[in-house]
Amino acid sequence: MRMKTYLLEDLFEKPISGEWGDDLEEGQEGVSVIRTTNFTNSGEIDLSNVVMRNINVEKHGRKVLKVGDIIIEKSGGSPNQPVGRVVLFLEEEGVYFCNNFTAILRPRTGFDPKYLLYMLKDLYQQRKILKFQNKTTGIINLKLQDYLSSVKVEIPQIDSQKRIAKILDKAQELINKRKEQIEACDELIKGLFYHMFGDVNLNTKGWASISISNACLKIVGGGTPTKSKKEYYIGNIPWVTPKDMKVLVITDAQMHINEDAIANSTTNLIPKNSVLMVIRSGILKKYIPVAINKVPVAINQDMKAFIVNNQYVNSQYLMWFFKGIERNLLSKVRGVTADNIEFKQIKEHQMPVPPIHLQNRFAEQVEKIEQQKQRFQQSLTELENNFKALIQRAFIGELF
């Protein structure tokens, strides 16, 4: 496949800055403005919470988004997520702008927008964008013009671009489908929980209630072993932090410690099948991470572990009970030096306690669903690895 070298700036018209406009006054309709909160990692735009703003369309007509425009994040990011994410605009109806933390990259004739989106995503994943970042007043900014005028890429003819984009689209569709199946497993468990136990906020089934603290043998916190002793971090005990709590079942973690780390710090060894909860984290504005550890673990100081009394509750019931009252708990999140839950209120919260045989039946069904979810997760990992391989081959001219 013939490839030609271009600078990124050769592929796009001059970047167009975003527009934020003014707040709407009463009775004004406004226009839709896409923000980085509407970006997804797949390169699609989530329009479920697009903000409406007062923008003079005639004055800023050049900034109105067109089908095929690529929106690039030029301010924002975080230490773990560099600035520079991209999404593709494909809406054919309505008037849309992007905000002033973003910019529009409008492809020139002869370049396929979908192909360019995947190419920019690949550059982002390779972290080639890092050298074009700077940080001011706590915000990471992308030096967009430097990025566009410095980075060279190999591009095939337009027909090959479209063929590659179609192949990558199909691979991405499979990934998205697998993610939907994983999410459906969690929704199935939520539905099963409600069917068996009713609305636990209102205790619609009329079960007897006890406080969460009385339903547990004990509730323990965590700690961080000193980082000065590197030998503490070469053990086989998963040390769980909020970053590891993106899943409902914990079998491993990013860091591992040993028995000496536990013996000489404020952390504890948490027995398996306990319920772990994040009580202090910025994520608490959105949801409260909870999980069950399938192996003994230690946790850091931003978390609590609920070691259940199996005479009253099993861990699956307790975890999904927490999910059932999540909205209630989120209303109690308060910020001091960091967002946190008033833990005393959690311990004293009254929990309906269905018969233990019913809870155990629920746990058995959850286990079956989790096994299917794990198979989906393994398949997703394989699909994502294959997608990365396709990307690598596509942009060095080896896909055809």
Image (tube, helix red, strand yellow):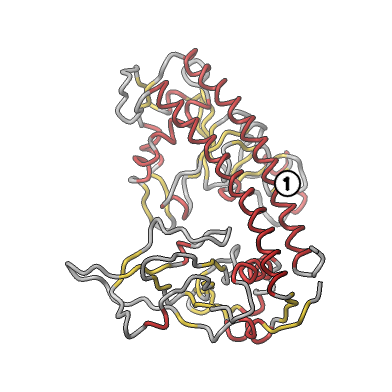
Task: Count all numbered tags in the image, as a single digit.
Answer: 1
Q: Nearer the viewer, residue 175 or 315?
A: 175
Q: Quadrant of residue 293?
A: top right
* Residue 147 seen in the current view: no
| Relative vertical location of residue 156 with respect to residue 171 in this rendering, above or below | below
Q: Is residue 285 left or right of residue 158?
A: left
Residue lying at 28% horizontally and 76% vertically, measured from the top left: 22
Q: Nearer the viewer, residue 206 or 195?
A: 195
Amino acid carrying label 1: it is Glu
| Relative vertical location of residue 189 with respect to residue 164 in this rendering, above or below | above
Residue wearing tag 1 = 382
| Relative vertical location of residue 118 with respect to residue 183 in this rendering, above or below | below
* Residue 311 seen in the current view: yes
Measured as percent of width and height from the top left, residue 190 is found at 46, 32
Residue lying at 46% horizontally and 26% vertically, measured from the top left: 192
The quadrant of the image that shows the N terminus is: bottom right
The quadrant of the image that shows the C terminus is: bottom right
Q: Secondary structure at mark 1?
A: helix
Measured as percent of width and height from the top left, residue 298 is found at 63, 40
Residue lying at 75% horizontally and 82% vertically, measured from the top left: 5
Specify few, some or many for label 1: CA neighbours under 10 Å numbering under 14, 14-19, or 20 or more.
few
Extreme-left residue of the structure: 26
Q: Is residue 2 left or right of residue 312?
A: right
Residue lying at 44% horizontally and 46% vertically, measured from the top left: 287
Measured as percent of width and height from the top left, residue 351 is found at 38, 26
Measured as percent of width and height from the top left, residue 248 is found at 56, 38
